[in-house]
């Protein structure tokens, strides 16, 4: 019996080729989207999950409450906190601080700058970074021990055994390779090429390593994850009790499960409110929407062509077929179509996966023949098959043989309320996806083109390393002579992302309980000119004024300090008093998802470690070549590694750009799927009304009148869908834009464009198909009468 079902299913596919192509094409497009979204979502949700006992690993978060009730959340902690927890808090098995940097490594004639982390000995016990060679607990064996990745081992030593080899770090540390670890999994949010003892970092920090400086991510491994709330409470109680520092009541340390740290990185009022998880949820919903749209195509096509199969159902019932067997027959047919669509979809996904990886900036790999993947694929096939075939199966199997065989059913099918409802629902989803994709795209363009308060074009930046620190003045003087170079300066931060945030600024009239946080940038002369900052009042730093320890502040800083006449006012930063000599316009010192912060520019050249070069954008290649040569002259041991400020800015929004691209691609596919379904539905509607059309033509009806008569039903349905979909998408996109402190307003033209595009899609698709019927020779249709 089952074999017969499959034979009938394949026979019907071959017999009704147009119907089969439309159904398989629509489902294939839908399953391509579903599979690609699944691969992306699976990669996102699996981040950091591969570590052993990951449920017992926590990241410590610092919450600082300001006097106005605002809570600042940092994913870094004071240096001594890790040691304090390790020594005083029961229930914490392991604790490890980390500090990211990059460092020059030298071995023989090889010079490499690689990513590094300083950390405590417990690091490799907390996380499952696999040691493949050497000591299993390499950090802490001695102060100059180092663990390196397999990739770095190959780069430095080739096929030689790296264990015991001595490499030079930053030209001053003799580091002995104690272990080699497996290259970091792409599913890790912590990435590095080598690991050094935290003690080395403490030496470099000197007096800056204290409870007042928040610099280090801190990770804990608990004995019992169920006691995390109790341990968190104990940490805060013990810190306040034993440290007794002023302001401790404003600081609270909370513990976030490490498995959540990647997806839930956004905090409001000290509580995690989301992050990348919102995109995971959004595209999971998109996948469901697209699958539903594709399945609706199948349902509509099946019910619209019910008349062509009504007699088949009637005959089967007359000869003894029961309703369950008919239901099984139609469900098997839909599942066969779903299976064929899935096979084609997987072939397309396999072929386009490299392109998809490039678009989303990932390196997703998948074993298409693995048991787990195949099981999930078959589950989707069954769900799609049952979802698409359920209504047609029960609808067709309910026909009464007597009515069907009399031919009465043929005149009443194809215009049911449910079919119209499915068409409207399908187009509502298409409208929501289309409007949402347009809003997301416009928001990204708004961000990338908004005036951020500084000029990020034509600025090149690189780190001050090696001999360059001592020879900076000579380098600067020579660089200024290069063709195309306009200005050269240095600072401790790029304005694209100012990480320093502190509350150590004092000014006349500052309230005793003030906890206002400022971002501070230490700079040299010409830094503000390189960045194109707009002077509002006073002057910028200049050599003729001997601006040692003077300040330039932003408008926001003046506002929060409540200074009526800021120029000449004395303020202090980190205990150093100076004078405000200028006020510049506010600028975005972080992502536009965050509000503008008050910023202070501190003329303190000795605390700068990045060079910024302003150049003529028309001479980029020449400037880069000349600077590469000049850098080699002054700092030959270090490779010249630079970035452009505009690229750094754009990289802040890589995630949003990926989301925008995905939204556009999947929306386009959803539109194609809807168009295919509408095309097929119009084809069967026109076929069913072919004799009516012929009679009307004989009676004098025009082609345009006939086309209008048949297509107006679909046009009405698309308009109804727009009236439902546009308000729904408005609500959803309002929620999306609230995640940005600065965003475009929702414009009415977004919904007008979406609505017009939807109606035009319906009109164009239907008219294209219906016109063929209207132009046909009436004699051909009426010959059988």
Image (cartoon, rainbow, N blue to C red):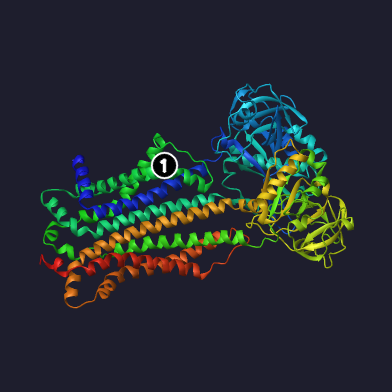
Position of the N terminus, as image quadrant, is top left
x, y percentage for residue 270? 65, 51
Quarter of the image for residue 768 reads: bottom left
Say if residue 644 shows up in the picture: yes
Q: Check the image and report above or below for 282 versus 586.
A: above
Q: Residues within 10 Å of mark 1 (few under 14, many from 20)?
A: some
What residue is drawn where x is 45% and y is 61%?
Answer: 434
> Whole-percent x and y of residue 167?
71, 27
Above or below 145: residue 309: below
Q: Judge whether 268 appears above or below 257 on screen.
A: below
Which residue is more in the foreground, 270 or 391?
391
Classify 352 as above or below 434. above
Q: Is residue 542 left or right of residue 441?
A: right
Q: Give the image quarter of residue 112.
A: top right
Task: From the viewer's perspective, tell me whether residue 341 is left or right of residue 126.
Answer: left
Q: Is residue 242 visible?
A: no
- Nearest to the observer: residue 527 or residue 336: 527
Could you tell me which residue is drawn at 44 percent across and 54 percent down?
666
Query: Where is residue 756, by image quadrant?
Result: bottom left
Which secondary structure, mark 1?
Answer: helix
Q: Left or right: 756 with respect to 535?
A: left
Mark 1, residue position: 350
Outermost residue on the bottom side: it is: 700
Front-lying residue, 749 or 156: 156
User: Where does the image place residue 241, in percent across and percent down from the top left?
Assistant: 77, 42
Quadrant containing the C terminus in the rendered view? bottom left
């Amino acid at each position: 019996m089952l074999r017969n079902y499959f034979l009938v299913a394949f026979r019907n596919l071959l017999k009704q080729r147009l119907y089969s192509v439309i159904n398989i094409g629509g489902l294939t497009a839908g399953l391509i989207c579903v599979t690609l979204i699944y691969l992306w979502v699976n990669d996102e949700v699996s981040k950091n999950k591969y570590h052993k006992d990951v449920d017992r690993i926590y990241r410590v978060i610092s919450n600082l409450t300001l006097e106005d009730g605002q809570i600042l959340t940092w994913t870094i902690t004071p240096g001594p906190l890790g040691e304090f927890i390790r020594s005083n808090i029961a229930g914490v098995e392991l604790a490890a601080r980390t500090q990211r940097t990059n460092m020059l490594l030298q071995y023989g004639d090889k010079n490499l700058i690689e990513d590094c982390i300083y950390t405590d000995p417990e690091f490799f016990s907390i996380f499952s970074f696999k040691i493949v060679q050497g000591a299993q607990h390499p950090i802490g064996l001695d102060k100059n021990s180092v663990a390196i990745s397999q990739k770095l081992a190959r780069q430095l030593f080739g096929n030689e055994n790296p264990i015991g080899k001595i490499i030079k770090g930053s030209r001053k540390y003799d580091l002995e390779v104690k272990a080699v670890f497996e290259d970091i999994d792409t599913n890790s949010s912590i990435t590095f090429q080598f690991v050094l003892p935290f003690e080395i970092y403490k030496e470099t920090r000197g007096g800056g390593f204290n409870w007042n400086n928040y610099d280090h991510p801190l990770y804990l491994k608990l004995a019992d994850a169920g006691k995390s709330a109790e341990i968190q409470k104990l940490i805060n109680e013990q810190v306040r009790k034993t440290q007794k520092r002023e302001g401790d009541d404003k600081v609270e340390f909370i513990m976030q499960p490490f498995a959540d740290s990647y997806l839930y990185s956004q905090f409001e009022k000290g509580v995690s409110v989301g992050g990348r998880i919102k995109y995971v949820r959004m595209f999971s919903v998109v996948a469901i929407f697209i699958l539903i749209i594709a399945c609706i195509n199948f349902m509509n096509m099946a019910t619209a062509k019910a008349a062509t199969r009504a007699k088949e159902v009637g005959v089967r019932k007359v000869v003894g077929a029961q309703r369950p067997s008919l239901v099984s027959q139609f469900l098997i047919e839909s599942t066969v179509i779903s299976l064929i669509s899935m096979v084609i979809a997987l072939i397309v996904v396999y072929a386009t996966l490299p392109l998809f990886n490039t678009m989303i900036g990932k390196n997703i790999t998948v074993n298409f023949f693995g048991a787990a993947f195949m099981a999930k694929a078959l589950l989707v096939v069954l769900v799609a098959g049952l979802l698409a075939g359920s209504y047609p199966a029960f609808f067709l199997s309910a026909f009464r043989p007597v009515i069907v065989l009399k031919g009465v059913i043929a005149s009443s099918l194809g215009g049911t309320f449910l079919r119209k409802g499915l068409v409207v629902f399908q187009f509502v989803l298409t409208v929501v996806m289309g409007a949402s994709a347009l809003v997301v795209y416009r928001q990204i363009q708004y961000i990338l083109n908004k005036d951020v308060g500084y000029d990020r074009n034509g600025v090149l930046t690189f780190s001050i390393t090696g001999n360059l620190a001592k020879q900076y003045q000579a380098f600067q003087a020579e660089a200024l002579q290069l063709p195309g170079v306009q200005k050269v300066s240095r600072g401790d931060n790029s304005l694209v992302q100012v990480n320093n945030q502190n509350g150590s600024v004092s000014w006349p009239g500052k309230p005793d309980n003030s906890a206002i946080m400022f971002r501070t940038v230490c700079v040299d002369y010409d830094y503000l000119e390189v960045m194109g900052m707009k002077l509002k009042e006073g002057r910028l730093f200049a050599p003729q004024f001997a601006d040692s320890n003077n300040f330039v502040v932003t408008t926001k800083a003046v506002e929060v300090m409540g200074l009526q006449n800021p120029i000449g006012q004395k303020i202090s930063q980190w205990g150093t008093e100076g004078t405000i000599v200028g006020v510049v316009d506010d600028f975005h010192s972080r992502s536009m998802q965050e509000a503008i912060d008050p910023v202070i520019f501190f003329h303190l050249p000795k605390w700068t470690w990045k060079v910024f070069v302003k150049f003529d954008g028309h001479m980029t290649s020449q400037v880069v070549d000349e600077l590469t040569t000049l850098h080699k002259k002054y700092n030959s041991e270090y490779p010249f590694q630079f970035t452009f400020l505009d690229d750094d800015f754009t990289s802040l929004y890589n995630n949003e750009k990926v989301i925008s691209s995905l939204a556009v691609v999947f929306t386009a596919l959803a539109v194609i799927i809807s168009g295919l379904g509408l095309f097929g539905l119009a084809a069967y509607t026109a076929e069913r009304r072919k004799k009516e059309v012929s009679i009307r033509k004989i009676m004098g009806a025009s082609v345009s009148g006939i086309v209008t008569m048949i297509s107006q039903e679909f046009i009405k349905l698309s308009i109804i869908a727009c009236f439902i979909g546009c308000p729904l998408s408005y609500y959803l996109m309002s929620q999306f834009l609230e995640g940005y402190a600065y965003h475009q307003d929702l414009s009415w033209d977004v919904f007008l464009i979406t609505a017009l595009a939807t109606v035009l899609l319906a009109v164009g698709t239907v008219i294209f198909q219906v016109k063929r019927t209207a132009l046909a020779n009436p004699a051909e249709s009426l010959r059988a009468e």
